[in-house]
Image (tube, rainbow, N blue to C red):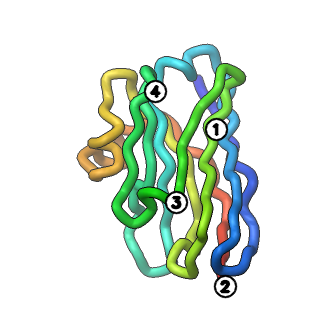
Amino acid sequence: QVQLVESGGGSVQSGGSLKLSCVASGSRYHTYCMGWFRQAPGKEREGVAAIDADGATSYSDSVQGRFTISRDNTNTLYLQMNTLKPEDTAIYYCAAIGPGASAGKVVAGSYTRYEYRYWGQGTQVTVS
């Protein structure tokens, strides 16, 4: 069993930066492909960044070059968000999917929500 807890959200002005963290409990964290998702009011949840167990990463076009996903050996997933825009305003979630998953397919939305084994509770990011 893995539990995911996000933190680091907040309110920033356009052009600012935030760093989100997702702490995973459980011994198998390092085997999962991990993703960051966001959902804005009235919109579908979308994948923004993902990293697989080997460290391969993928980003959506809307955040490429501005966001960086990383993971460390303390069971923590990060999302560094720079040059934030008002359209980045959303609730951000981290999620874990099986070790055979592709980071590219996570961002592309190729997996259904039910294929993800674990979800965090979300953290609000507001850019004004």
Q: Sort mark 2 into few (<14), some (14-19) or many (20+) by Cα contacts within 10 Å.
A: some
Which quarter shows the N terminus? top right
- The mark nearer the N terminus, 1 or 3, is 1
Q: Sort mark 3 into few (<14), some (14-19) or many (20+) by Cα contacts within 10 Å.
A: some
Which mark is nearer the camera, 3 or 2?
3
Compare residues 119 and 71 and report the one nearer the observer: 71
SS for callout 3: loop
Q: Which mark, residue 55?
A: 4
Question: Residue 22, how many percent across, how many down?
Answer: 66, 41
Alpha carbons under labels 4 and 2: distance apart: 32 Å
- The mark nearer the N terminus, 1 or 2, is 1
- The mark nearer the N terminus, 4 or 2, is 4
Residue receiving disc 3: 66
Residue receiving disc 1: 4
Find out whether the residues at labels 3 and 2 contact each other: C-beta distance under 8 Å: no
Question: Residue 75, how many percent across, how many down?
Answer: 66, 26
Vertical relation: 52 (above or below) 31: below
Alpha carbons under labels 4 and 1: distance apart: 19 Å
Q: Amino acid at mark 4?
A: Gly
Q: Amino acid at mark 2?
A: Ser
Compare residues 60 and 109 and report the one nearer the observer: 60
SS for callout 2: loop
Q: Amino acid at mark 3?
A: Arg
At 39% from the left and 26% from the top, the residue drawn is 98
SS for callout 1: strand
Alpha carbons under labels 3 and 2: distance apart: 17 Å
